[in-house]
Amino acid sequence: MNITTKNGWRGTVIDNLLLSIRFRSSAYYRPELRAPWGFSIDDRGPTFHFVTHGKCWIEVKGVAKAVQLSAGDFVVIPRRDMHFIRDLPSTRTVDYFNFLKSLVPDKDGAFIVGGKGPVTRMVCGGMKSENGVTDPLLAVLPPIIYLNRKGENVASRLRVTVNQIFEEIGSGRNGAAAVATRLADVLFMQAVRDYLDENIDIAESGWLAALRDQQIGRALALLHENPHQPWTVDEIADHAALSRSVFADKFTKLVGEPPLRYLTRLRLNVATARLRSSNDKLSVIANAAGYVSVPGFTKAFKRYFGETPGEYRRSRRKRFGLRRR
């Protein structure tokens, strides 16, 4: 089943969310791990782990159940959640990036560590989101996305993109890092879309259940299509054919945050994209994102990002060597 065609509002929201994916940098590794081994990974942004040989266990802090991975399995940790990956659930772990300081992976990110036990080979990647805390997709995804090898078409598509990433990294061409990061966007989109395809009709709670819900799903589509509108909870509830209190309670329970907080992230996501890609005045960007004044826009922006819109724009231009035309 294709989730983007079954219901119009679902397609609207899914397309909008996938288009919001934008990473500003990425790094990749190809570890060969001999048991016993174990690593912890913390506060590094979205990461993925693709098992190409052997088995291992992954556990996300705060999630009760560890998941065993086998060759062909692919997992994504969509936010910055600490997670543990090891040969057995009982194996002690060390910080992955501190450990890497004592190693020198080759140009393809390959290295060999561990003991003398069974071998697990993996492809691992870490990305930094351009939109950070306002990214509407990262905020609504579960702590772990698990795509197992039983979905052979899924694994095949992801494997092709992973191979393209490493081909680009190994090419030595100018701009290889930038191209690899754009391919990370594609890889993440593929993984998330496959996850949504597999789970949207069976989710009993959370954002997927909200998207399937006739009333809350249509409200989500309304907000994604028109984030610039001066919405009130009463107006959104009216479109959903619910009373204000019932709508607000149902939306918060399913989506995980109140309607206007969700709307704020959508608006700021629109603003960050425009700050990076245009020379528009702040008043124009503020208006396009649904803010009636630059001070109101600046206050909301700084609360989320810790910097003003102008500082955000200048830092992005400096990073990519762009100049004002």
Image (cartoon, rainbow, N blue to C red):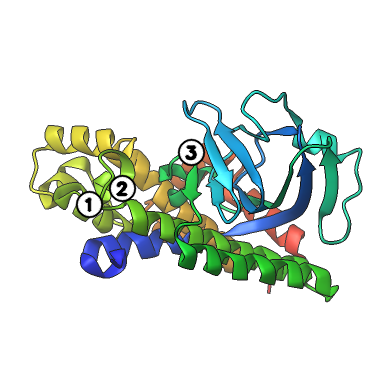
Alpha-carbon span between mark 3 and mark 2: 14 Å
Q: Nearer the viewer, residue 299 or 92?
A: 92
Tell me the amino acid under the disc marked 1.
Answer: Arg
Q: CA distance from mark 1 to mark 2?
A: 6 Å
The quadrant of the picture occupied by the N terminus is bottom left
Which of 54 and 93 lies nearest the eye of the viewer? 54
Q: Residues within 10 Å of mark 2 (few under 14, many from 20)?
A: many
For the view shown, which residue lies furthest in the front direction?
117
Label 2 amino acid? Leu
What's the residue at 65%, 50% (across, down)? 128
Res. 221 mark: none
Mark 1–mark 2 contact, CB under 8 Å? yes
Residue assigned mark 2: 208
Viewer-side residue, 185 vs 114:
114
Between residues 301 and 118, which one lies in front from this camera angle? 118
Secondary structure of the residue carrying tag 3 is: loop
Q: Residue 219 in the image: x percent, y percent?
A: 21, 51
313, above or below 102, in the image: below
Amino acid at dot 3:
Pro
Q: How many marks?
A: 3
Q: Is residue 83 left or right of residue 265?
A: right
Q: Considering only order in the chain, which callout, 1 or 3, is on the residue closer to the N terminus?
A: 3
Residue 199 shows up from this direction:
yes
Cα–Cα gap, marks 3 and 1? 20 Å
The residue singled out by tag 3 in the image is 143
> Dot 1: few (<14), some (14–19), or many (≥20) neighbours within 10 Å?
many
**The residue tagged with tag 2: helix, strand or loop?**
helix
Residue 279 visible? The answer is no
Looking at the rendered structure, the secondary structure element under dot 1 is helix
State the residue position of label 1: 212
